[in-house]
Amino acid sequence: MDVSARAMVEAIHASPTQAVLYLSGGASQALGWLMSVPGASNTVLEAVVPYSRMSMIQLLGKVPTQFASRQTAEDMALMAYNRALKLSQPGFPVLGVGFTGALASTPPKRGDHRFHVSTRTSNQLWASTVSLSKGLRTREQEDRVSSQYLLKAIAYGCKVPANFVSELTDTEVPDEFEIQFDEDQELDQLINGQICFKVYPFLNDMSRAERKIILSGSFNPLHDGHLKLLEVAASILGEGYPCFELSAVNADKPPLTVSEIKRRVKQFENAGKTVIISNQPYFYKKAELFPGSAFVIWCGYCSKAYK
């Protein structure tokens, strides 16, 4: 790893972003670079290499039209993003990274040598395809070039400088693509099941606590009983990050509209309390969504007692 790559990794680790990486078919050196610089635990939540066809199929839950393609990289990034949401510490921004490549191999490939990278954050999908000059580099050299490019993509997703000299030639021009999401679009994706939840960290406390202390409800309206109940539960349970959880999807009613979700979220902003919007109305599904969390179980009668 050269000096510029190390500086980029240090900047990534110094950022608050926590990431899950799914890599297949190349960029293996990037993972080594990330893990070899102190502070990797600040950034890397999980790294998975679904290298075989069956491993990739099980990861995606489907047979991709093409294993080394931009669409597959985007699918991997979205799955990595959802996984990062589940594993991340409360209040921290998360990043999902997908990489798939068709690099030099034995026997030689008939098709192009190329790789595809995609990153997903709460408000952005970014993807890029790079076709390499066939026969110009060894497999190790192609892996290095793809690793440099992947590292640059991660830095971009973490919003840190990515200053290094690219080893791509003038003819190896990346084909980049980016979509920005606003809050309404993100909530639509949540309702439709594309993303598993959205955090509104109004508590302004980027806690390193591993466990969430969650009070679920409809909060229509949010009242002092809810606030007191979570406060008492947090004091009893000790270390943990207290937050409220509201499901946009109801077990026996239509989903909440985006405008209604935003109206209820506004209550938590006014109270300075963190709320998570999920799409799981059942507690056994919430438990899968928030592993290791403590749930505060309450009833309407109990909440009325605090009014």
Image (spheres, rainbow, N blue to C red):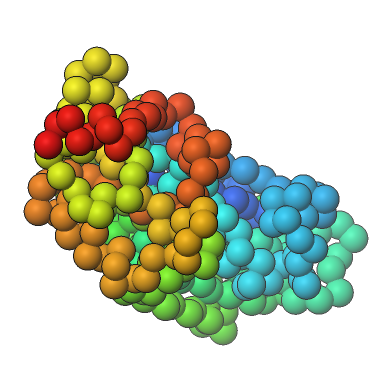
Q: Residue furthest right?
A: 107
Where on the picture, by quarter, is residue 242?
top left
- For residue 28, side relative to residue 83 (left or right): right
- For residue 289, side relative to residue 14 (left or right): right
Q: In x, y percent, where is residue 74?
A: 57, 67
Of the 4 image quadrants, the one containing the C terminus is: top left
Residue at 62% across, 52% down:
23
Where on the picture, by quarter, is residue 112?
bottom right
> Residue 252 or 79: which is nearer the viewer?
252
Q: Residue furthest bottom?
A: 171
Could you tell me if residue 246 is visible in this image? yes
Q: In x, y percent, where is residue 301?
A: 27, 33
Above-or-below relation of 187 to 169: above
Could you tell me if residue 43 is visible in this image? no
Residue at 57% across, 55% down:
79
- For residue 68, side relative to residue 241 (left or right): right
Where on the picture, by quarter, is residue 60?
bottom right
Q: In x, y percent, where is residue 145?
A: 56, 61
- For residue 205, side relative to residue 156 (left or right): left
Query: How many numbered discs sit on the rendered protein?
Result: 0
Residue at 47% across, 66% down:
254
Residue at 86% across, 74% down:
110
Q: In x, y percent, where is residue 200?
A: 26, 53
> Residue 264 or 42: which is nearer the viewer?
264
